[in-house]
Structures are given as structure tokens and as C-alpha cells.
Amino acid sequence: MFAADQIFRRSSVAAIPYVHPGNNVEGIKKCPFMNAEHQRIKEKHRTLASTGCSKDFCQAGRAIHTDEPRVGENRSLEIVCQEAAEFLRDLYDEGFFHSEAQFEARLQEVHAEILYGATGGIAREHKLPTRLGGNWTQSHDELEFGIRRAWRNARKCIARNHAKELKLCDLRSMTTSVDMAKELGPMIWDNQILDFAGYKMDDGTVLGDLANVDLTTAIMELGWTPPQTRGPQDLLPLVTMAEGDKPAMMEIPAPLSNLVNISHPQFPSFAALNLKWKAAPALTRLGFDIGGVQYTAAPFIGWFMDAKIGVRDLADTFRYNVLPDIVQAIGLANGKLQDGVDSIEDLPEYEQLAMLSRAQSELNYAVQWSFNQTSDTMTDSLTASKKWCKFDDEFKEKNGYRLPADPYWLAPPQGSIIPVWHRGGAPNYQPKPMISKHVQDPVKAWRRERHMWQLVPEPPKLMTFSQTAAAFPRLVEKKMAEVPVTEIEDSSDDDSDAISLTSTLSEQKTIAIYFCSAGTIAEKLAKRLHKRIEALVKVSLNVALQPRVECLNKLKATDMTADKIFLLVVSSTGKGEVPPNGSGFLRVTRLSSIEGMSFSVFGNGDSRYSATYNGAAKAVHQHMQDLGGRPLIRKVFRGDIAVEPMPYTAVNNWWNSLEPRVYDLINKDEAIVVDYGSKLEALNETITVVNDAVDRLIDHGRDLSFFKDAFTVAAQPVKSDPAQRSLNLSIDIGSTRYEDQNCIQILPLNHPSKVDRALKVLKLDGAATLDLSTHKDNPTYAIFLTKSADLEVPFKTLDWLLKTGDSSASLVKELLSNLTVLDTLELLAKTNLLSRFLTKPSLVQDIILSIPLLPTRTYSVASSLSAKPTPSSAPDANIVDIMLKRIPNGRFSSTFLTDHSTSPAKLQYRIVDSVTGPRLRHLSAQTNKPLVIVATGAGFGPVKCLLQSRIAAARCAKSATPAFENMSLFLGFHPTDIPLVKPILDDAEELGLIDGLHIVESNPEKKRVQDLLVREDMAGEIRENLLGEKEGWVFVCASEGAAKGTRGAFQRVLGMDGNENFWAKKYLEEIF
């Protein structure tokens, strides 16, 4: 899949919108020869780009159609305005604008920007002088939507089912060739970032890639010197060229230049062929055409499909043409080459076909097998084809027409054994936004224009690895990730206050990487990091790399010597415990030789479990320090699978923070080493406390950078009833998209009146900046007290009171220990104790850093996209519902909602997936499987989402009977919660979606919902639905105690204690 689109700049001829007729299609004249599907396509896409065909000539057999649009073309003002308006209308249809008025305002803003930038020139469409459209500035969200939609519209691509996963890396600010070389853009000579050279030899043959002979010659003319010993897979340097600037060259950093060795498990002779290929495709000569704006360079990295290498790149006669060599290597020609037959070309064609077909099949298998042995991603043609067919079928079922498809490109080269080969009749049309080739060849453009440059006699200097250090992390990040990545602020701690000692390094350093995890994520991250650091080993004479990553239990005390640098990737399990393959390490005891080793710990945690977030990593980090290790970064570097399910970006950021420290350790005679030994012990304990508090505040601020503003819309019921246990709350989340079974993390901001009270008591200017010394983006006091300070709980410590020297301070400290922060400050303001602090900024900071940080709360989204719940009070809103338990004095459910009871409340939020979200969405789509649900209290939230989805599907069904298997619900509620859930349960029963509804209300006898499961009449029904041919599944959403009891009940009913397959695949459990 595509890891990241990098957008650099727009062509000077790109532009913006004009008017749009909206969705009214009455004016469209229907063609008498157009079928219903074609008509729906025209209604949805009022403007279609040319596919090059006409009524007289069909270009279906051409790889590149003659009339295809290109980026970098002049377009008239009218065309640009029209395309911009239609793009904005697409955004409106997708919920980016809350109202027609907001859409019209944005349209006018864009229209004005286009007109302002309009110029005169020759337009492509009619080749006549006219006014050309100007550019308009698309926001990050608009542009990201545009590149995703362009990928979905890419009729030549089979992997478009991943389009929504595409992430934007916005580099439009880069304007020079050198800057763009570091960032990969904007006009790039190479066809891919990783491109092999093709050398024309004296005898007329070609060494390397035949497709790149002209490119290689041009780059050599620019000043590149090939390796002294040329080979078939020499990587070309990256050549970039900005508008109005001469080209810049950059060598490919070592971590990106690692190639995959192609071998075959059944044919050892494959190795003698020395076949290799690059690990990932990173296309560079395509652009994006989005809303009238033309992006002339948008490199993106993805992954290979097996046939691209095995059937095409290595096998094509006009590329590497290795099939004849493979025929010989695996013995397919044995016995055939005799009696004057010297080569396979002398054999009958049917014999050649048989041998070459077999060689091609084995090569394709070898490619897939070889990639599987590495950490590099590859998909096979059969899987890709099946996924595409499913994606296209689902799109047609929803929209009434198929996605655009060019069969020349879409059908993999293996032919009829691939399902997509047989999908005749797919419409070949081209909507916008779209991906397209550039109107100019950059090499030809340079050769035309280079006479205008006063070039010095010596050739351009090739930027070296060390000279491109700034680009190295980003480049390797693309290689590491192989998934959509986003530029995320570095989440490491600032070490400017760490103590530095100088030590002489005479011995070689060794980097060792260990992991521990109950699953596979930590191991995958460790292996990828290992592969990346191999590049460091190649360029440093003073470092070695342990040959392979190992589980943490294999790290012994005798391995931990001063010449080692340990990098540990640690996942948590259970309640923040160290997983079994790492728990043995905690029993390692200290040896004298351990003194002086360096280490860093990456925590692979889940912030949805805030109380235990990265608990295992913290325990390992502390143990390493107890063993005498010196941390390269003061604290655990945190990854969060709630934000990034496979945290490649976080690991990249971790290494980017470590890299300069590691270089210091391995490459300098007098290295700077962070020392937390005896010197640290001599520091005043207060300094350590302050530093930790600052670290926590900085981490908190970084976490909040992912949060957006939202507003409460309505809460039902709204009343101050002590008996009320739960409520439904609706929240307007703006333009953010979400999926069924997502969660919403909420930050309940402090009420402005309380912030004002705190500022007044502390005599602070809200606009003044809180000085954290070590952090560049310090918050203002108003922002800190609004978003970071928890004013509703007691101070973490009141030790700062003792600094007054007042004899009564100790007594006052004890009396105030249970009061909230705000109450404590206001009470102290009435005495002279607080006033003594307010004259000294350092003492005020002591107070600030003693305030607990405001935690987030995570709730299941209790509404389905298909139902689109929108209260009448906010018809243009993008609403999500949550169901929450009302807790006395609860920070969100009680205090926050009470503070904002008379008006919509502003809060901050981010959408994350639930722990069971992906599996629950997958299983809930299997409507032919019985479903048994157990939920208690607010755990009904995701069940409500599921019911809404099925109710919407049933109401849209053509037949009166929905195609759903039976669903059994076992629910536990407090009696006051019943009115909240009754309406949706009634609707589901009326539509026949619920086969059995069993509700247990809170009762003095302490009978629980799980007790129902073991009743014989219920047990028989459950066994029938879950065992045998029906193969039903279970979803449990309850408190920890109720979930544990429910699992035990199912084990008794099913007698499946040892059936790991059932518990792993058919039993979903969400604990709140």
C-alpha cells in the first residue's frame, strides 16, 4: 500500500473553481446509446477526463493513451474554476462542510484566489490565447481527501481498496532543487526513488536495466560517476529539479539501498544467478490533478505485487530478460540442447513456451518467497485480484456503477487463473481528482534549458550521506514504514538538563536489539529497526550490530557490558505487565561489569488503558537503570497503538532521536555520554521531581496535539437525579470521519470561569507563557489551566507550602490535603501563605507543576454511520453518540456536564479504534452467522452502534425479511437505564433482528446477567448457535468483573476450555 504521498508544489498553470450546478442533473441530455450504469456515472461525475478513445478508434490495447491529461498543462480559467467547484462539491457530499452556507463561503474564497492568480496564455483544450486559471491553496484535509480520491479513481491500479489509508506528507513549502532533493521532489528525473542504472556497453549490449539507458546517460552527463566495478543493479542517484533552478543530485542513503536477494527454496542454483530487487516501489514521475490544481511532483512509496517483479521487471525481454538463465539454472533444458541445438531459441516454439512458462512461474514464486523471508511487504496477484473484485462489487452495490477500470493495466499478467481477468464489461472512464503523468520529460526539459545557466566547468557535486543527514531520517522513514505515515512531532524527552561526562572510547561499540511482546508487533518493530541500523554499521568503523534481534528473556547479566548499546522494544500485556518472553529479564541481578552500558526503551502501549499505559516498558526501563545502565533518553519513548496500530512512525521518531546520541558514542574519540550514575545521586531530589513533572507536562502537551475541538449537542436524559446511572450524549465532531465500532477519547476542558478564578488567585496573565526551560512550544497559563491542569482533584503534593518557612505550614498542608486544587488555592488566597509565593516566579512554577494533569476519558461510539444520528437542534452537524455511566463527582460525566448544563460544552477529542474494532467490523459483516451479545451498563454503546447499522440495512432491504441470522442479547442494566435502550431494542425487535432479548436488572440478590447463560434452557440455545455448522460468535462488552464471569459461564456451557481457536477468533471481549 502507499506509505505517503509527498506533495511539493503546484505547476504555475494550476487553478481554482467557478460555479457548480450542484446535484441537479435535469439539464443532462441522455444519450440513447448509454446504458443505466453509464448514465449514473455521468450524473455523478459531470466532468470526465479523456481516455483517448473515439467512435472510430479504441485505444484499449495501448499502455498509454494519446489524449490522456497530464499535469503541468495550461488550462483555461473556466475549466479550472469548474473543476475546483466540483471538487468542493465532492467534499460537501462527503461531510467536510457542515452546511450549504459554509460550502458557498469556501467556494467564494477559492474563486477569488483563482481569479487573483489568473494569467494570459495558450490553453490546452482549444490551443487558443485565453485567460488561464490561477492556483488555489488547498488545506491539508482537502488535499488529503483529494489524493485519496485520486487513487480511488486510478483506473490502472488494482490496490485501490487501500485508498482511504493513504496519508499526506505536505512539503509544498520546498522551493529549491537542493531542498527538494532532501525531501524528494518536485520534478524528478528518476522514474523511481530506487532506480537501477542501465549501461550501454561498447559491444552494444546493456548491463543493468534496459529501460534506464537514456536516463543513466543523462545523469552521467550531469556529473555522476558510476561505481568503479559496474553491476546490473547499481542504484542511480536521485536527481531533482525545481522550477527556475538547475538540477541537484543526492546519493541514495545506505538504509534505502538494501536489496532483496531472490532465491528459491527448492532450487539452490537460483543463488548463482545473483538476482536482487529493491524492497519497495517509490514512484516519482506521476502527479495529481485535484480540483483544478496540478501537483507536478508527488512521489509515493508502496509495496510490490509479485508479478510486477517476477513476471515483468526481471522477465521482460526489454528489461532484465532472466528467464533463459533460469531455464538453464533449474535444469529445464536438460536433454533438450543436443544434436546441434545450442540454445532454447533453437527449439520449437511450443518447447520454448513450456520452458519459459515454467521458468516464469518459478521466478514469480521465488520473488514472493524471498520477500517473505524479509520484513519487506509484498502481495500476490491472486490476493490483490480478489480484494479488488470485492471492493469493486461493494462499490457498485452501494453506488449503482463500477469504479473506472483499464483492463490492459488491471489484469495481472498471469492470465485467466486470476479472477479479474474474467471481469469483462467494466467501464473505462476517468473522473477527477486523478493521478497522471507529467506533460514534460524532465531530462528533455533540462537539455532544452541548460544553455540559460552559467555553469562552472566542474560538474555538480554529488551530495554525500553525511551532507544529507537532514534528509536521511525522512527517507529511511519511508523505507521503514511501508504503510500510510504522517509527520508526527518527536515524542522523546528533551535532555538539555541531563548531566554530561566525557569518556574515552577505545573499544568498538555493539548495538543489540531485544523485544518482548505477547503478540508479534514488538518483534516486527525490532526487526525493522535492526534492518535500518544495518546502514549505520556500513558507514561506521567503530560499531557492530548483533546479528539478529532476540526476545528480552535471552538478555543475561554477562551480556551487559560497557561496550554495548541496548535498544529494547517492549509491549505491555494484561494490566501493564511485562510479557512472558521478557518477564524473566526482571530477575537479572546486577554485576560489576554492567556499569557503563547505554540503553533506550521503546514502549509499544495503548493509551486507551491509561492506568497501565506502557507499564511494561516503564518497568524494563527502571530495571535497566537499577542494573547500572545509562539511558540515552531519560524516559521511555512512547508508542501508542490507539493512534497508530502498527507504530512504525513512532519507532522512526525514536531512532531519529537516538541517532545523534549513538553517533556520539561510536564515532568520537571524546564522546558525550549521558551519565546518571553517582553524579545524579548527588543532585538535590527536588530537581529530579521538577524534571519529571516537566517531562509529564511536555508528554501531555504532545498527546493533546492530536486532539480537535468538539461540542456537546444534547444529553438524554438531562436531570440531576441521584438514581440516574447512565445517559446518552451527542457530540458534534465537525468534519472528522470515523468508522463503526470506533472509540472517542475525550478531554473535558476546564470551564472558563474556573480558569479565570485560578488565574486571579495566582495573579497570572493568561497570555503569559509558562516557562518549561527545555521545551520550545511552551503553553500559555490560560491554555495550561484549560487543557492540562485538573482543577477538580487535590494537588499531587503540597510540599511547596513548606518553602514559606511558616511554622503553621505543616498543619495547613495536612488540612488541605483532600481539597481540590481550585479550592486549595482560593482558601490559601485568604491567608498570607499564598502571597509569599506569588512574588517569585520559581515558586509559582512549583505550584503549577504540582497540579495533576487532566486525563482523557475513552468511550465507545454508540452510533452508526449508516444511521447518521443528527438531532433536530443541529441539522448540519456531524454527530456521534456515546453512552456513559454517571459517576458521582466524575470528572466528565458529572462535573464537566454540570458546569455546561445551560449551553453546548466545548471539549477536545480524537477518534481511535476500539481494541476489538477491526474484528468486530469483520464479524458483524458476516450476517449469516448467529451472534450472541452480552453487555452491561454503558457497555451497551458498541451494541447500540451495531443495532443501528443492522436496522438501517434492514430498512433499506428490498425484501421485508432482512438477511440476518438470529441475534441473542443478554443485557444487564440498572432500572433507570432501561428507558435509554428501550427505543432501539424495540425497533430491532420489530424488524425481526433480535431472536432473544434477555435483560437482568440490578437486584438485591446480586443475580448477574452471566448467570442467565448457564440456565439449561439458555445453554441449549447458545450451544446450538455457537457450535456445529452455524459457527456463531460472541461479543462481550462489560466491566472487568462481569467480563471474567461471562467468560467462565461460556466455558461451562460450551465445554471448550482448551479450544483456543474459538476464544481467539469467535469470542470478542471489550472491557471498560
Image (cartoon, rainbow, N blue to C red):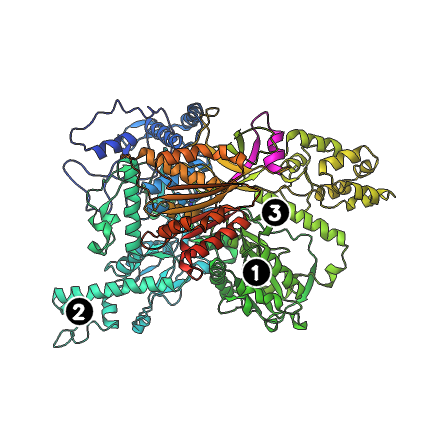
* Disc marking residue 344: 2
Which residue lies under the disc numbered 1?
578
Name the amino acid, label 3. Asp
Please say whether residue 1032 is visible from this viewpoint. Answer: no
| Neighbourhood count class around disc 3 (C-alpha, 10 Å): few under 14, some 14–19, many 20 upward | some
Vertical placement of residue 60 versus 195, above or below? above
Q: In terms of secondary structure, where does tag 2 sit?
A: helix
Q: Which is more toward the observer, 202 or 632?
A: 632
Q: How far apart are marks 2 and 3 (CA)?
A: 66 Å
x and y percentages locating residue 925 in the rendered image: 35, 45
Q: Which is more toward the observer, 129 or 188?
A: 188
* Mark closer to the chain start, 2 or 3: 2
Q: Which of marks 2 and 3 is in front?
A: 3
Q: Which of marks 2 and 1 is in front?
A: 1
Q: Is residue 904 magenta?
A: yes
> Which stretch did the figure color magenta?
891-910
| Neighbourhood count class around disc 1 (C-alpha, 10 Å): few under 14, some 14–19, many 20 upward | many
Q: Nearer the viewer, mark 3 or mark 1?
A: 1
* Mark closer to the chain start, 3 or 1: 1
The answer to whether marks 2 and 1 mark residues whose Cβ atoms lie closer than 8 Å is: no
Q: How many marks?
A: 3
x and y percentages locating residue 755 in the rendered image: 67, 32
Q: Which is more toward the observer, 127 or 168?
A: 168
Q: How far apart are marks 3 and 1 (CA)?
A: 22 Å
Which residue lies under the disc numbered 3?
699
Query: Image point 54% across, 41% down: which residue?
Result: 1002
Q: Which is more toward the observer, 614 or 264?
A: 614
